[in-house]
Amino acid sequence: MADPSANPFALAQEAAALIAERTGVERHDVALVLGSGWGEAADLIGETTATLQATELPGFSAPAVQGHVGTIRSILTSEGKRALVLGARTHFYEGKGVRAVVHGVRTAAAAGARTLVLTNGCGGLNPGWTPGTPVLISDHINLTAASPLEGATFVDLTDLYSSRLRDIARTVDPSLAEGVYAQFTGPHYETPAEVQYAKRIGADLVGMSTALEAIAGRHAGMEVFGISLVTNLAAGISPTPLSHQEVLEAGAAAGPRISRLLADIISKL
């Protein structure tokens, strides 16, 4: 097995080769990372032709968050495309390093995927976005003080979240709002002062994932589409204390509707 400390890209290639061998699919077209509330979309995209336990693949580990699954699924869409659904997301706050956070994305790129779909459950800064509201990600602010890129690796992040793909999404639902997502480190929720800081620097959404994965996807040459599910109003905006149970409940309530939305968007990508 490749040494991840020596070459994370070799490890991704190793994992992708094993995915191809065990799924019987030489190349996948699109990769999806399904965050809190979005899991049901995998069943609506198409026919699952293979399901792998992520822990059986090099560089992957079991999810540490309730609401995430530990599988990687190969799906044949009704349009004849191959989708790779990554249910084993590693979060930055788990302390496994940025390489582990973006390993799934790099593996998907090595498996052939040219489109990356990133989803999450997040806190909303707009009081009009009630829990259950899907919001397209137009840009992000990376507040982790980290990057998946190492050394003199300079990558342009203009239009990181593809405007072309956002336009496609709005052909499915013209009412979709969009906003800027700020990734904090977690695992604690943001303080009201931090939420106000994020708002003043241009954020509309706050969460603990996505930005680092998007950067790695762009570096790998993938076209990135991001969509958030507002599961709660952020601290200081919400009149009640925040809890992960609230996130799960909002995700469960919105699950069928947003999963159908995402499946319909995927069919047009």
Image (cartoon, helix red, strand yellow):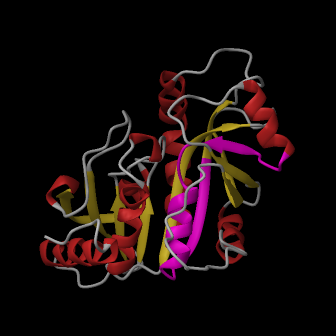
Q: At which x and y percent is residue 112?
A: 36, 83
The part of the image, by quadrant, that contains residue 176 is bottom right
Residue found farthest to the right:
200
Nearer to the camera, 5 or 227: 5
Q: Is residue 205 magenta?
A: yes
Answer with left or right where residue 44 lies relative to residue 222. Answer: left
Answer with left or right where residue 176 lies relative to residue 212. Answer: right
Nearer to the camera, 177 or 12: 12
Residue 73 visible here: yes
Q: Quadrant of the N terminus?
A: bottom left
Q: Is residue 78 magenta?
A: no
Residue 269 visible here: no
Residue at x 39% of width, y 41% of height: 94
Question: Which stretch appears magenta?
Answer: 201-228
Residue at x 18% of width, y 62% of height: 57
Is 145 located above or below residue 49 in the figure?
above
Q: At which x and y percent is residue 165?
A: 64, 73
Q: At which x and y percent is residue 181?
A: 68, 51
Nearer to the camera, 116 or 263: 116
The part of the image, by quadrant, that contains residue 69 is top left
Q: At which x and y percent is residue 192?
A: 75, 25
